[in-house]
Each structure stands twice: as C-alpha cells, then as structure tokens.
Amino acid sequence: MITVRFAPSPTGWLHLGSARTALFNWLAARHGGGRFLLRIEDTDRVRSDARFLEEILEDMKWLGLDWDGELVYQSRRFDIYREKAEGLVVAGKAHREGPAIIFKVEPGRTVEIEDMIHGKIIFQTENFKDQVLIKSDGSPAYNFSCVVDDSSQGVTHILRGDDHMTNTPKQALFYEALGLIPPKFGHMPLILGPDGAKLSKRHGGVSVREYKEEGFLPEALANYLILLGWTPPGGTEILDLAEATRLFEIKDMNDVQAKFDILKLKWMNGEYIMKKPAADLLPLLRDQFVRDGFDPARLGDGPLAGVLEAYRVRIKTLRELGELADFFFKDDYAVDEEAKAKYLGPAENRDNLREFAARLEKLESFSHDAIEAVCRDLAAERNLKAAGIIHPTRLAVSGKAKGAGLFEIMELLGRDISLARMKGAAL
C-alpha cells in the first residue's frame, strides 16, 4: 500500500508550491488506496507559530484535502532523533563534536537515485560535507529527522519539489547507515513566475491565504495547481479532485518547469463561478464582502442571488463582484466622474431623469419589465433613443457607466433606493 506524507513547517502561510506538493501527494494516496500522512516539521522553536499551523491546516481543508491518522510533531520527538544518532556513534558512523553529533560522509562513493519523475540521477559524495545529525542546541538536522520519521511512519513514496534534490542523496546515506530500505523519490519541477524566475512575492500572491482572500474558489485553485506538474489524459483542463484522483498516476507527472499564469487561473476561476450553484456561492460571497468592507446584511439571500446572477458572467473572482456592485451594499459607492459629467451634466438629461423617476413612482409592480416599458415609452415620446435615458439613470443609481442590465439592477435595488438616487442626481 502506498504511503505518502506532507510535512509543512509552521513558520509562515501555506505557499502555493507547498499546496501543490500536498495536492499531488494526496492524489497519489487516494488514487492508490493508500495513506496520506501529515507531519509538522516544527523543530525551529523560534520561528514556529501555532497560528501558522492553524492556517495551514485550514487552507488544506479549504482545498479539499484530508489526511489519515494523527498529526506527528517533530518537536515532540527530539529524544527519538538523539537515540538514533547515538546509535550511529556507537556503530562508528558518526562522532560527537561537543553537544552536536556529526555523520561522516565516505568520499569516493556514487549515489544513484531512480527518480520517479526525472529518471536516474547520480551524485558523487566528494561534493558533500560531513552531515550534522544533531545540532549543538539539541535539535535534529532536517535531513536526519526526515529519514527517522519517514521510516517510522512507513512512508513508501516521497513527492517533493526539485529544491530538495540535493537533500535526497544525503538522506539515502542515512537510510543505508541505519539499515533501512529507502522510499521511492520523485522531485517536481518548481513553479516559476512569468519571467522564468522562482515564484516569489514580486510576482504577486504566493500563499493560498492570499488567493482565498482575493475571491478564488478552492476548486479552481486546486485544479490549476494540479495542472502545474501533470497533464491529465486527453488534455482536459477543468476537473475536480474526484476526477483527478481517478486519472492521476505519478509516472505521468511532468519533468519540466511550469510558469504560473494568473490570467489562466482567473479564467479557470471564472469557469467555476459560472457553474457553481448560487446556494453554494452565497456563503462564500458573504465572507468575501465582509473581508472587503461591505455590509452583506443589506441584502437577503434572494436579492443577493439576483445580484450574483446579474454579474456572474462578468466576474473572474468573488472580489470583483464587490468592485462592480458596491452600490448595492453602501451609499458611498465609487462614482465614475467622467461619465457623470457626460451623462448627468446636460440639463436635458437631468430633466429626462426627473420625469422617468416621476413615472416610476406610479408603478404598481417595480419589476424590470415594467421599468423597461416606462423607459422606452418615455424615450419614444421625447423622440430619444432609449440609451439617452438608460445612461443617465445607470450613473444615478450605480455611479457606473456600464454593468449588468439597468432594469434588473433597479429591480434588485428596489423602488425606494432607485428613486431616491435618481431624484438626487437630477438636482
């Protein structure tokens, strides 16, 4: 049975590269009916922070990932690491330097790794220094603690980034010294920014948290990250975790670096927004509005669902809905000043707006069909194109020169708000 692990360090938010590593390990386990374990590499007592761990776990759940068994904390296993290191000292394979324990690397050896993604990789031990097993402060070195934990947890396959490539031969030497069978290793090419450099802050957001706050859906972000390292059979691009689990094979992973393309991610997120039922989107929308400083309580579920449907085809992220439809949630909404001067500056336009408002007051039903009929009748009487009334009215009720259908917007805003804004703009 395949057993894999994801081992985050709680020293910061969950990086997109780390999230991708977790996703591929999870897919490998679920596809093979195996186990996906979670180990917390918190040996850095100064930088490790419980709030980061809480966020990492929450982000993993948000992406749709679960794990098997209890969490393993390296900070609680220092005695085990020292015991294993002391055993290597007794065996003559390591020595003490004060409180530290150092592993002697034998020169002149060749270490071969059959990488699951890159194929055979060869290393020469001349390029390695002697390796620290236990540091002078009593904490374990990364490579040694990984080997001890992976072997004790029964990890059979290790999928991680190419930045760990140089760690693998050193870990192979530790497996050999401890008399253990090493797992299979696979190293994924790193995610690059558009300029070909390693993805970093200068390219934009690099953590899952940032994309969540920008209004990306978890299904879309997970889908996109999976494509940065694996091409599904048939080349399909939109697939959920269930379908990815069914199709995924480690042997099909790409051995070339992938560039992060925010435009493609936004396109994909827009596709998921289009398909997701309104009932599932509304809780996410309300959370998004609160984060962005809007008051979602101003609209009930029915009107909010109406706003969503009016703008669904126009948005790529949930945050964009607030930017486009801020006038639903607050009275001090953004106003396009140039368009205001163009459409509300002429006295004739303001007169048409006053008359339109006066006629709308008499409507029994403030429905979009009824509003439109009044608009077109007024335009015909005054020998105008309907746009001559629509543009000033849109500016009056929304502050914007374009957007969703005006009459649908007015119905959603309601009679009182729509007429109050029209009358105010006509002064």
Image: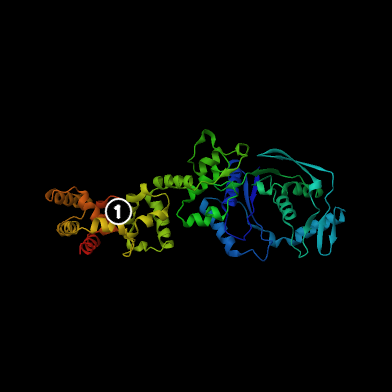
Q: What residue is at 47 percent from the left and 57 percent from the top?
A: 213
Quadrant for residue 350, please give it.
bottom left
Q: What residue is at 64 percent from the left and 50 percent from the top?
A: 5
Q: How many marks?
A: 1
In depth, the one of 305 and 202 nearer the eye is 202
Measuring from the top left, give residue 78's x and y in whole percent.
74, 61
- Mark 1 secondary-structure assignment: loop
Left or right: where does residue 36 sit relative to residue 335?
A: right
Left or right: where does residue 270 sit relative to residue 76?
A: left
Measuring from the top left, give residue 55's x and y in whole percent.
55, 60
Left or right: where does residue 331 sit relative to residue 352?
A: right
Q: Is residue 395 above or below residue 159?
A: below
Q: Which residue is mark 1?
A: 401
Quadrant for residue 183, please give it.
top right
Query: Does residue 396 appear in the picture of this structure?
Result: yes
Quadrant in the picture for the N terminus: top right
Q: What residue is at 38 percent from the left and 57 percent from the top?
A: 323
In depth, the one of 273 and 257 nearer the eye is 257
Q: Residues within 10 Å of mark 1 (few under 14, many from 20)?
A: many
Residue found farthest to the top: 234
Q: Is residue 254 above or below residue 89?
A: above
Q: Is residue 23 above or below residue 98?
A: above
Q: Amino acid at mark 1?
A: Ala
In depth, the one of 226 and 425 nearer the eye is 425
Residue found farthest to the left: 381
